[in-house]
Amino acid sequence: MKFLEENLIRLKAEVETAQEAIEAAGSMLLKEQLVESTYINAMVNAYHANGPYFVLAPHIAIPHARPEDGVKEASVSLVTLKEPIKFGHATNDPVRLVFGLGASSSEEHLTVLRSLTNLLNDSGNVEGLKNASCYEDIKTILEKER
């Protein structure tokens, strides 16, 4: 599993829309050949079809699609947004942290989600991720969780 490695993190990204934020999170997974380009399209299509169901907590979005939409390896990317973006969620907008999640099976999906949940259950970690200015800041948070 590739989980928030340096090449899967983009800090203080400037995006205009929720779709651009989803594409930014997906593009890192694509660049590392963890997903196919069809997966990014599927994440965007799921957002347009189902709304912001993946905005799971205040300031946190975890866009994803189905394994058969083009996942090659379980992985999680992170895009922190320079300016918060509204995804259309009644209580958890605006979003500052966008985690692109890819899993090639439902078992992997649960494993990846568990790792992410453990990290995000600590509000100090969430604040640290929102305020990170370099990968070392994030690495420190991740090492504390291991």
Image (cartoon, helix red, strand yellow):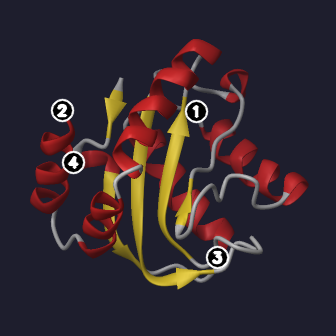
Identify the mark nearer the N-term, 2 or 4: 4
Question: Badge 4 local density, few (<14 within 10 Å), some, or many (20+)?
Answer: some
In space, the residues marked 3 and 1 are separated at their CA atoms by 29 Å
Is residue 140 rendered to the left or right of residue 32? left
Depth check, mark 3 against mark 1: the one in front is 3
Q: Percent from the top left, x then y, of residue 49?
A: 90, 53
Identify the mark nearer the N-term, 4 or 3: 4
Give the quarter of the image for residue 70: top right
In space, the residues marked 4 and 3 are separated at their CA atoms by 26 Å
Using the image, determine if residue 138 lies above or below residue 104.
below
Assign a secondary structure to mark 2: loop
Residue found 33% across the figure and 30% down from its top: 2
Q: Which residue is mark 4?
A: 6
Is residue 88 rendered to the left or right of residue 105? right
- Mark 1 is on which residue type? Glu
Q: Which residue is mark 2?
A: 146
Assign a secondary structure to mark 3: loop
Residue found 61% across the figure and 40% down from its top: 37
Q: Which residue is mark 1?
A: 36
Q: Tell me, yes or no, if residue 66 can be seen here.
A: yes
Q: Are marks 1 and 2 in contact (CB under 8 Å)?
A: no
Give the quarter of the image for residue 146: top left
Identify the mark nearer the N-term, 1 or 4: 4
Assign a secondary structure to mark 1: loop
Question: Badge 3 local density, few (<14 within 10 Å), some, or many (20+)?
Answer: many
- Mark 2 is on which residue type? Arg
- On the rendered image, what quadrant is the N terminus found in? top left
Identify the mark nearer the N-term, 3 or 2: 3
Question: Tag on residue 93?
Answer: 3
